[in-house]
Image: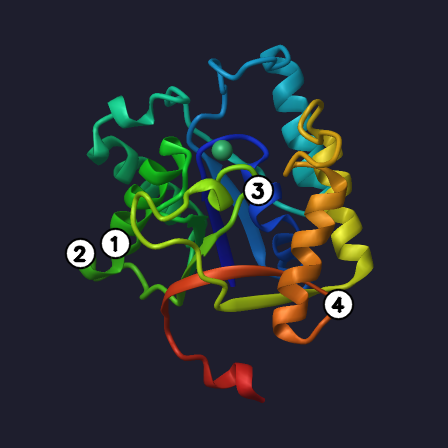
Amino acid sequence: MSVLIVVAHPDDEVLGCGATASLLAARGATVRACILSAKAAARRGRPELDELHADMRRAQALLGLGEPILGDFPNIKLNTVAHLDLVQFIEAAMLETGADVLITHHPSDLNDDHVQTSRACQAAARLFQRRSDVAPLKALHFMEVLSSTEWAFGAGGDQFRAETFCELGENMLQKKLDALTCYRGVLRDSPHPCSEQVVRALAALRGSQAGVQYAEAFQTPFRLFDFDALS
Ligand SMILES: [Zn+2]
């Protein structure tokens, strides 16, 4: 299995699905992130670029992810980039990785960069319908990113619905928190949504929905039924 996590900014991949990504990698999947605004140049309080990229690589290594694919699109201004350019960048990442599972932002996220990323990723996901040499996609999942997805309030469409759950043990949840810590300045004090307490609380809430202690949840607009998964 090859999983491609398509996100707008560095650290989104950890907040949205860091534990699931690490679990999949530990079970033998190739998991890589495609980060469209990898420089995050307009981010307030951003460290120097080499520090940000060092943080990013430490986080990905800790989670067991492969080399990230980095875009140079402008953050907080992804809506000024031609949709086609984003789609083609994601398609190239899909071809490079042979991705058969895509994870991306929710299309009604509050953060407009996340919305643009999701829309472009959904268009790119249909690559197999345009090219006979590309294997059909197995699944497309939307993730939730604390401090933006929960603040959408339905203004841009439907709010996030938890539909697919990945059970996490304490060790995987802690690994997600450790990966977030790799990104300097991302984890804040409670009650900020990007605090250890709230990351743990969301994992506990999603876990309770699925009857387990902790989970990361996804909305799943597309999935090819996997009979092997039933055995
Ligand atoms: Zn983001």
The image's mark for residue 146 is 3
Q: Which residue is mark 4?
A: 213
Residue 27 lies, with reference to residue 192, above or below; the image says: below
Q: Please tell me which residue is depicted at 38% across the width and 31% down the height of the picture.
A: 113
Q: Are marks 4 and 1 in contact (CB under 8 Å)?
A: no
Q: Is mark 3 within 8 Å of ligand 1?
A: no
Q: Is mark 1 within 8 Å of ligand 1?
A: no
On residue 130, the disc is 2
Secondary structure beneath disc 2?
A: helix
Q: Mark 3: which amino acid?
A: Leu
Compare marks 2 and 4 and give the one earlier in the sequence.
2
Q: Give the image location of residue 38, x and y in percent.
A: 49, 25
Contact between labelled residues 4 and 2, with CB atoms less than 8 Å apart: no
Taking the image as shown, residue 48 lies to the left or right of residue 41, namely right
Q: Nearer the viewer, residue 203 or 71?
A: 203
The image quarter containing residue 119 is top left
Q: Nearer the viewer, mark 2 or mark 4?
A: 4
Camera-nearest residue between 173 and 123: 173
Viewer-nearest of discs 4 and 1: 4
| Corner quadrant of residue 90 | top left
Let me know if residue 63 appears in the view: no
Marks 2/1 in contact by CB < 8 Å: the verdict is: yes
Is residue 164 among the parts visible in the rendering? yes
Q: CA distance from mark 4 to mark 1?
A: 37 Å
